[in-house]
Amino acid sequence: MKKLGSNEIKIFLADKYYLVSNENFQLFYRSIIQAVNPYNYYIKLTGQVGHGYNRYYEWKPGTEDDGKSFSLQIDVCDDNGNVLSTKTTTLVVSSASSSAATKNILCIGDSLTANGYWVSYGAEKYRKAGGGPINLLGTIEGGYKTNVKYEGRGGWQWSSYVSGFGDIASPFKKSSGTGISFKEYCTKNGYSNIDEVYILMSWNGVGGSFRNFPLYKEPFASAQVLIDQIHSDFPQAKVTLLGIPQPSVNAGLGAYYTINQSYGDNYGQFVTALNYNKQLEDFSKMPAYANFVRYVDVKAQFDSEYNMPTESKPVNNQSSVTELVGNSMGMHPKTEGYLQIGDVFYGALCHEWN
């Protein structure tokens, strides 16, 4: 029997995760291991804190852990304990900052941001936890229970916010000539400045099985234009790149798209999303951006098995027995999924940018 090599199993674990004291943290194996079924392997955890379950790692740090960092190692092993792949991350613990200074925060995204759920949920948690005052900016208003402002539009991608979407201009478009201006955007909408920007993009424009993303081509070419303009207009502003959640692993993509469409390949698109998130993190580490851009990993904290929409479907044409299968495009979460993204946003808000 052929023994698997370490290069055949990849672990997409971010370098750092932002935990909040007295807030339960979960890291889902399915969302970080490139395998059709990661549960076929022995997943070994090594560290000083937390608990290992069948599907996830879990830990609820206390206030005594504030300001501390903890190492977590994940090994993917065969049935005999031989390590096939290994990755280490750092769990950084903090509590909501009580700074008296108000922060102007702009959240930008595509259809995952269009309803404003993750923005309002995370911001409200931050407020209730005693976090410092924040002012959410935007020309769109929505949210989960509480309405807030943001920029989130279905179907848009990085290039849309640079050049517009069809006949619709970018909200950051200059009043005359070409290009975008965040200074003009603030002036037009009555904002004094921008302190932080959170960007959650992009499912749009990243279709394709096992696709990789060179940092000098789209969508990162447009990402560079957008982020460069933010930095040019407001050099003190910090930019957080939120990774996209993994798609439905219950055939949600296959149920919505036909097999001749790139998005109809459930596992191939799953790997593409892993690769895209890895490139987002690599982008944040580039020398030109490392001082003001950080990556925050959403996928590992998102339960793609249970927080994507499903419906009951007969197991075959002649049976009354049903099984749960994905639906609703396989990319748009249930409400609970949006709230999980909001938890990640909350965790990032609680950590002074670094």
Image (cartoon, rainbow, N blue to C red):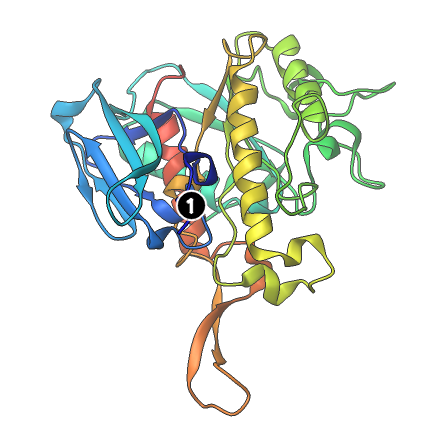
Q: Residues within 10 Å of mark 1 (few under 14, many from 20)?
A: many
Which quadrant of the rendered structure holds the C terminus?
top left
| Direction from residue 24 to residue 200 in the image, left or right | right
Residue at disc 1, secondary structure: helix
| Direction from residue 280 to residue 86 in the image, left or right | left
Q: Residue at x 48, y 67 (%)?
A: 310
Relative to 162, residue 109 above or below: below
Q: Residue at x 55, y 66 (%)?
A: 327
| Direction from residue 308 to residue 54 in the image, left or right | left
Q: Residue at x 49, y 54 (%)?
A: 333
Do we see residue 123 in this rendering?
Answer: no
Relative to 244, residue 72 above or below: above
Residue 264 at x, y = what percent?
65, 59
Q: Amino acid at mark 1?
A: Ser
Do we see residue 139 in this rendering?
Answer: yes
| Direction from residue 1 to residue 283 in the image, left or right | right
Q: Nearer the viewer, residue 4 or 244?
A: 4
Residue 295 at x, y = what percent?
47, 25
Which quadrant of the structure image shows residue 273? top right
What residue sits right under mark 1 in the picture? 31
Which quadrant of the structure image shows residue 97? top left
List the single residue furthest toward the left: 64
Q: Residue at x 39, y 40 (%)?
A: 300
Q: Nearer the viewer, residue 268 or 96?
A: 268
Residue 161 at x, y = what percent?
71, 31
Residue 169 at x, y = what percent?
79, 34
**How many numbered marks have been drawn onto this rendered protein structure?**
1
List the single residue furthest toward the front: 1
Q: Nearer the viewer, residue 141 or 23?
A: 23
